[in-house]
Amino acid sequence: MATLTLGTDATTTLTAVNFTKTLLPADVATINRGIRDDKIGVAGSHPIISGDSFSVQGLLYVPNRGLLQILPGDYIGIDADGWPILVSASSIGFGSSSWTHS
């Protein structure tokens, strides 16, 4: 087995927020409405996870996988199929980072 490369089809197709403890409720709700359960249904029609999968307290629930601690400056994104993606502030902040945000 060998390692692979991983990327997205387009650079800015993820819906994302830059995490701070003062995020607007509407931004938190946008991410929550987008997180879906990838183990139920078929791609493109997975059900939305009920409750608070993402919270301003710094927690991100990844469906069927568990809980992640989010730190200030981290980016939380969701892809078109509802999969949550966490990128650390350190990773996205490096000048040579392959991450793009706007």
Image: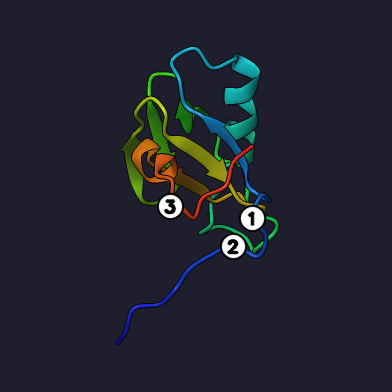
User: Which of 11 and 65 lies nearest the eye of the viewer?
Assistant: 11
Query: Which residue was labeled with disc 2?
Result: 8
User: Viewer-nearest of labels 3 and 1?
Assistant: 3
Crowding at mark 2 (Cα within 10 Å: few <14, some 14-19, many 20+): few
Query: Which residue was labeled with disc 1?
Result: 11
Residue 20: quadrant of the picture: top left
Helix, strand or loop at label 1? It is loop
Q: At which x and y percent is residue 87?
A: 42, 44
Check disc 1 and give the amino acid type: Thr
**Of the image marks 3 and 1, the number of the one nearer the N terminus:** 1
CA gap, disc 3 and disc 1: 15 Å
Query: Which residue was labeled with disc 3?
Result: 96
As drawn, the label of residue 102 is none
Image position of 9 (left or right of 61): right
Image quarter of the C terminus: top right
Check disc 3 and give the amino acid type: Ser
Helix, strand or loop at label 3? It is loop
Q: At which x and y percent is residue 5?
A: 44, 73
